[in-house]
Amino acid sequence: MSLVTQSYTAGIDKTVNAMREAAPLVHCLTNTVVQNVTANVLLAAGQAPAMVDHPGEAATFAQIASGVLVNTGTVAPHQVESMPLAAEAAVKAGVPWVLDPVAIGALEVRTSLAHRLLELAPTAIRGNASEISALAGLGAGGRGVDATDSVDDALPAAASLAERTGAVVAVSGKRDLIVWDREGDIRALWLESGHDLMPRVIGTGCALGATMAGYVSIAPALESLFSDATCAPIDAKALAVLTAHAHFGAAGQLAGERASRPGSFAVAWIDALDELSGADIAARVRVTEASA
C-alpha cells in the first residue's frame, strides 16, 4: 500500500466510525424511483432517512435534519418549488446539503432547476461525468441518467464547480473523482473501488448522494483527525465525501464476491453496507492523488 493510500484510508476508517456514532438524520428530496432503496441504504450504512418534499414542510424539516439531499431525478411541480426552499433553509440553519443533478442537460425543467440550486451554496455536489460537465456549462449532458463522458474528461468541469461554489465535487464512475478547492488550490483524488454490477442496480448513485449528506454533516467533528500524522491533509468535507464513496465501493466489492446477478447483488450490497467496519472499508479501497 502506498503512503498516499495509507494516509487517506486511515482517515476513512475513523470517518466511518464517527458517522455511525453520530447516526445522522438525512432529509431526502429525491426521485420517486429510488426512495425505498435510498431509505434502506441509509439505514444499512448507519444513518436515518426522511423523505419530506411537500413545499409546506421541506424548509422546516431541512433546518432540523443533520444533512439534506436534493436530487433532480424525477422532478414534479411540487419539488421544483420545495427543493430551493429546502436548500435555502438548510444554508440559513447551517445544515450541509448535497446537490445531485440527475439527468440534466437535455431536459429543460431539471436543468434550469439545477442551475438555480447551484447558486444556493451546496456543500457537496455529486453526479456522473456528463451531469457534472453539464452543470458546469462544459457539456450537453448524457443519455438520460447514463453518462456519455468519461470521468477523466470531467476533471476540468469538477474543478470549475469547486472553485466557483466552494463545494466538494464528486464524479462517479469506474473510478471516482473527488475535487475540492483548498484555499485557492484545486485538489483532486482518485478512488478505486466498487464492482461492475453496481451500475446495473437501481439507486446506487442516488443513494450515494443521500449518504454523502449524512457523512458531510459530521465534517466539523473530523477536524481532530488532522492532528494525527497518519491522516493526510485533506479538507474535512472532502474526507467525508471520499469516505461515502469508499463505503459504497467497498460494499460493492464484497457484494460482488457473494452474488453474480443484479438482483442478488442488490441485496448483498445493502447487507455489506451494514456489515463492513471502517477498517474493512479502508482496506478494500485505493486512493491516489490526481493532478488538477
Image: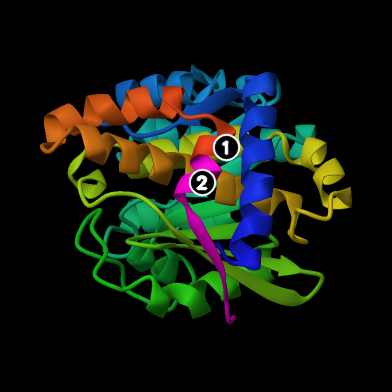
The percent position of residue 190, horizontal first and vertical second, equals 50, 66
* Left or right: 195 as drawn, with respect to 12: left
Which of these two is toward me, 171 or 118? 171
The percent position of residue 111, horizontal first and vertical second, equals 39, 58
Q: Residue furthest left?
A: 261
Residue on which the image places disc 2: 283
- Please name the residue shown 23% across and 58% down the image: 146
Residue 70 seen anywhere in this rendered image of the structure: no
**Amino acid type at mark 1:** Ala
Residue on which the image places disc 1: 279
Residue 154 seen anywhere in this rendered image of the structure: yes
Instruction: Count up the numbered dots.
Output: 2
* Left or right: 241 as drawn, with respect to 72: right
Alpha carbon of mark 1 to alpha carbon of mark 2: how far?
A: 6 Å
- Please name the residue shown 56% across and 60% down the image: 169
* Left or right: 251 as drawn, with respect to 52: left
Residue 220, quarter of picture: top right
The residues colored magenta run 281-292
**Amino acid type at mark 2:** Ala
291 inside magenta stretch: yes
Helix, strand or loop for disc 1: helix
- Please name the residue shown 58% across and 34% down the image: 278
